Amino acid sequence: MEDVLAVYAWPYDPARPVVCMDEKPYQLLADTRDPLPARPGHDACQDSEYIRCGRSSIFVWVEPLRGWRRVQALSRRTRTDWAGQVRQLLSVDYPDAEAVVLVMDNLNTHGIASLCEAFEPQEAFALAQRLEIHHTPKHGSWLNIAEIELSALTRQCLDRRISDLDILNTELSAWQNATNTDQRQVNCPPTARPGCRRPGPDGSKVVTSMTITLLPPSSPEPALPTTTVRENTGTAPRLISGEVPAHQVRGGCSLAVLLRGRAPWRRHSRRHLSTTRSLDRERNDQESPHGPLHGNQHR
């Protein structure tokens, strides 16, 4: 986590731009009936039924400090597709960059092995040499700034049904050009905390921090209380005294005693039924004039 935060704290360097990448699935849908447009006094109406026209995967590449992003939808999400996107990033978007610092999640297709599978060894090696990959931690993909762009894209461009992949890419290109014109950036200012330093591209030390909420230490296990409970033997109920575990005490009686009275919510619990049989066995041993019984003499 701190590795990704340290990368975000680096100063802007055109020779080593920091680019965040993410992707999301998108379902192509068509209307079964033409929607009714809005008119005075009435909102637009759309039928709840729709036609599935396939699925696609939207790739988002964003450079937060520069305010640049590129969005493209493909029909599949394979290693070859991701490798093609990386080649376009390095050859078309950043041809003069010394290296691209790439922040992304740990998806199975996001790795150097995808380049080796899609291209010849020489080209794959050349592309890999210009990549510096920083993966977000497991269950920590929210650190990826590209997810912010995907959220804005979903609300501003994908809030309606789109049935064709070409139409989807046309809409994505329009949103991309408008957003790049506005130069919308993402600012992640670091705060000082000792003990977390990482050299930036120019060799300077960058200090980052994160907030951690510590839970109070758990309280020690309570002692076993001496509790008087009521046992239902089937005849006249009588009181017994003894040490009953605190987690079994419920309203003055233990679960074993409740089971003796055939509590419906735990009637078929083998563990507690065996506890009940043990209580019966001890009572019979105490009341038997011939002493304790053994083996198969228990009934």
Image (tube, grey):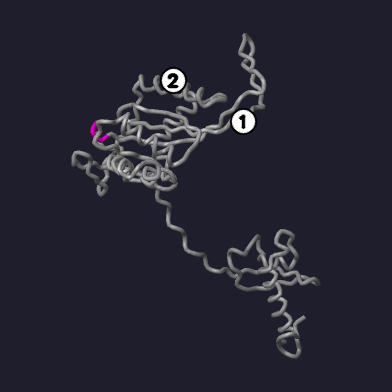
From which residue to which does the magenta span run? 12-16
Say whether residue 50 is visible: yes
Q: Is 241 left, or right, of 213 in this rendering?
A: right
Q: In the image, which disc is placed on residue 174?
A: 2
Which of these two is toward me, 41 or 156? 156
Mark 2 or 1, nearer chain start: 1
Q: Is 195 left, or right, of 142 in this rendering?
A: left
Is residue 7 depicted above or below 252 in this figure?
above
Q: Position of residue 147 (x, y in %)?
A: 43, 35
Say whether residue 209 is visible: no
From the image, state whether disc 2 or disc 1 is nearer to you. 1
Q: In the image, which disc is placed on residue 52?
A: 1
Q: Position of residue 35 (x, y in %)?
A: 64, 18
Q: Is 146 left, or right, of 230 in this rendering?
A: left
Q: Amino acid at mark 1?
A: Arg
* Secondary structure, magenta segment, majority class: loop
Q: Is residue 15 magenta?
A: yes
User: Disc 2 and disc 1: Cα gap in Å?
Assistant: 24 Å
